[in-house]
Image (cartoon, grey):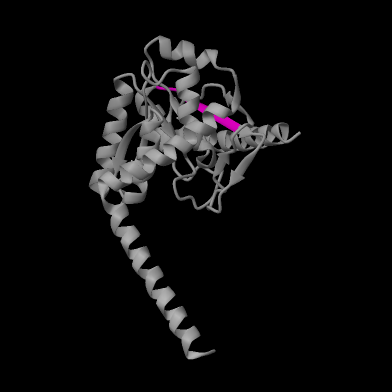
Amino acid sequence: MTIATRFCIIALMSLYNKLKSWWKEFFRKKWANGILAFFVFLGVRFIQLTSWTSYRNVEPIRNHLRSGKPVIAVLWHSRSLFVGKIWSRKIGVWRYPLYAVFSAHRDGRFISNIYRYLGIRRILANEKSPRERKKVVFKILRKLDAGYSVCITPDGPRGPVPMKFNTDSAFLFALKSGAPIVPVYMSASRFLSLKTWDKFMVVKPFSRSVVEFGDFVWVKDKSDIAGIRDRLTEEMTFRTEKLDKEMQK
């Protein structure tokens, strides 16, 4: 390797590190975080507007919300990007607001900004602070008591295992509030699977997708949680895989 080649490589690596450092510093700014999230939102909205979606078993959840009572929507993290479209098109994000919990870290805040633009209200949580986690629990319970619905991805946000309940929070909230759990399934004919722990699904423009609401799940006693969790994990995995096969035909 010649001296000139080595000099070019060193210069490029130095430039790369500076750009990387600048990008991290830029991303830390709340206003920059919000602007970047807005551009991602525009891309998501374009996909939503150019994709055709069919909905199944919507009436039970609509009737329940019309009675003034909330639900706890659960769906796998890999299918969560289009929850905004699901709620706005068939439920109504303004009449029946939906809350979701996001990390207060800059990455979580960035993601929460995207969902906020899509109509999902956010609750920010500091995962490293036990005191803050307790505050978030009380916030969610207050929202449910006030009649607002909550969305939970039980296998996320970081896994490590996709399509598995890594937390019992949905069941505990259902037990405390009396609100039913409603599983939500979604699949598409054309999509990208990102290189993440759960192969996060991004639907491509001009594709077909289907959204299906499952039957209500009620939690009456804490001793029932283990059995309900096992049954719901099996059902959600089975029905998600079934929709994937249906949409690929």
Residue 161 shown in magenta: no
Up-down: is 241 above or below 86?
below
Residue nearest the viewer, comparing 152 with 39:
39
- Front residue (pair 88, 146): 88
In the image: residue 247, left or right of residue 41: right
Number of marks in the rendered image:
0
Relative to 62, say whether 23 is above or below.
below
Q: Residue at x 57, y 28 (%)?
A: 50
Expressed as whole percent of the image width and height from the top left, the position of residue 59 reads: 54, 12
Main SS of residues in magenta = strand
Residue 119 horizontal side relative to residue 161, left or right: left
Magenta residues span 179-186
Q: Position of residue 88 (x, y in %)?
A: 45, 22
Q: Residue at x 55, y 47 (%)?
A: 162
Residue 148 visible to the viewer: yes
* Residue at horizontal 31 percent and vertical 31 percent from the top: 140
Let me know if residue 74 appears in the view.
Answer: no
Rendered residue at 53%/53% (across/down): 197
Which quadrant holds residue 71? top left
Q: Is residue 36 above or below residue 115?
A: below
Quick check: is 185 in the magenta stretch? yes
Name the spot of residue 196 as percent of width and height, x first: 53, 52
Residue sticking out furthest to the right: 249
- Give the position of the N terminus as an image quadrant: bottom right
Residue 61 lies left or right of residue 99; in this view the side is right
Q: Observer-nearest residue: 136 or 246? A: 246
Q: Position of residue 229 (x, y in %)?
A: 52, 36
